[in-house]
Image (cartoon, grey):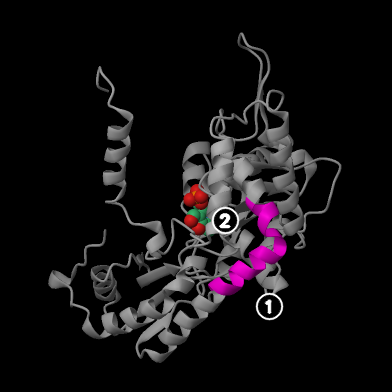
Amino acid sequence: MKLQGESLSNVVMELEARKSKDPDLNSAQLFGLVYPTGREDIEALVSEVSQMYLFENALNPFKFPELAHLEEEVIDSISSLLNRKKTSRRAGAMTSGGTESILMSMSVHKARAVARGVKSPKIVAATSAHPAYAKAASYFGLELVQVPLDKFYRADLDALKDAVTDETAVVVASAFCYPYGVMDQVEEIASIAQNSGAGCHVDACIGGFVLPFLEKLGTEVPLFDFRVPGVTAISADIHKYGYVPKGASVLLHRDDDWMDYQIFLYDRWGSGLYGSAAIAGARPGAPIATSWAVMNYLGVNGYCELIKSVMEVTGKFKNLVGTIEGVELVGNPIGPVIALESDEIDLYGVGKALEKKGWHPNLNTSPKGLHLMFSPIHSKVIDKLCSDFEEAVIDHEKPTMGVVRYS
Ligand SMILES: Cc1ncc(COP(=O)(O)O)c(C=O)c1O
């Protein structure tokens, strides 16, 4: 840090210059990491509410009781969206994101397993599960047992059955997974978990704000939420298809008393009782307030409208892929996340050609190919994306030395 600070305008100017080197969210050329709606009303609401709650701290609900009530209402709304039966106690918490929700769930499942006598608790998850499970295993001294995928890129149920033992703390089902947008068979997985005394965590970090609305729109969505017996916890991210800025997710438990394993209480210091329901201590108010605001503003109908437009975009792109010989969708993606593979066409080369046209597609390593997540804003550019993709397939460069660098 410099001894003498810069002028306000210099600071802002430098940030503007530096930000311009990163991709422009409103160009609609990113496919993941961000979920722009392209809707001025939603962005204006989020900006205003973020400004209102810029410096609040949700750590202490006694100092910011109304912020705590907003958080409770967000948790209650998502609990009802995911068909959690109302109980006398709230069994959920907001966290900073999918990773933190998963970390807390794995920690709670571990504690539950230890309480029933498990000596070396394990997480069983398909290879398509998010890295957060490996992170949890590494942080909390759990073992991650990975199971392969079936030919539809879902968890292989036979392998999963074999992997689950008395030592299993939790079995993971993705609804749906990041790499392919494919849903695991939640009902079967939860039943396997339940029969062994283990918990079942449903990773609805992406699907939590997609699947309930697809179901309401009439799409056949396999049961994935608390209606499924044996599902013990669900993570759902508001900062993905809930369309709020980063820092907003929920973890929900089926049973009230599981929160006892999540809440950390401590009073052996000089400042009284300290309590916290997740990893972070101080927590920003804006993710809570923007979640509350956007969920109340859009309502179920607003979310349905948005996901309908996202699925139209996804459908258009999938139809195009169907016409391109040699390029296949990976598995059977249910929502707006898709992956492409090919034995004949170098899709990394296609990705590079798309990058030259300004797009930022993601790459998958297994199977080797492209990965796309569509957001509402893509409805503004889908025709251009389709024509650029067709051109890229025709014109793409062959990789030199058999290695394609992706950045
Ligand atoms: C299925 C799934 N689970 C968990 C996560 C982790 O979420 P976050 O990046 O918000 O920590 C992601 C992120 O993309 C995801 O796709």
Q: Which percent across, then down, holds residue 328? A: 41, 83
Q: Which residue is mark 2?
A: 42
Q: Classify residue 164 by image quadrant.
A: bottom right
Q: Is residue 240 left or right of residue 214?
A: left
The residue shown at (62%, 48%) is 291
Residue sitting at the far left? 401
Choose the circle earlier in sequence order: 2 or 1.
2
Going by the numbered disc 2, the residue's amino acid type is Ile
The label shown at residue 220 is: 1
Q: In the image shown, does 83 or 266 lie closer to the viewer?
A: 83
In this rendering, does residue 95 appear at all?
A: no
**Dominant secondary structure of the residues highlighted in magenta in the image:** helix
| Position in image of residue 47 (x %, y %) | 53, 46
Task: Choose between 360 and 358: the one closer to the eye.
Answer: 358
Disc 1 marks a residue whose amino acid type is Glu
Q: Is mark 2 within 8 Å of ligand 1?
A: no
Q: Going 78% across and 39% down the picture, which residue do you hit?
A: 257
Residue at horizontal 40 percent and vertical 57 percent from the top: 25
Residue 295 painted magenta? yes
User: Is disc 1 placed on a helix, strand or loop?
Assistant: loop
Graded by Cα atoms within 10 Å as few (under 14), some (14 to 19) or many (20 or more), the crowding at tag 2 reads some
Task: Work out which residue is located at the far top of the displayed protein and give it.
Answer: 270
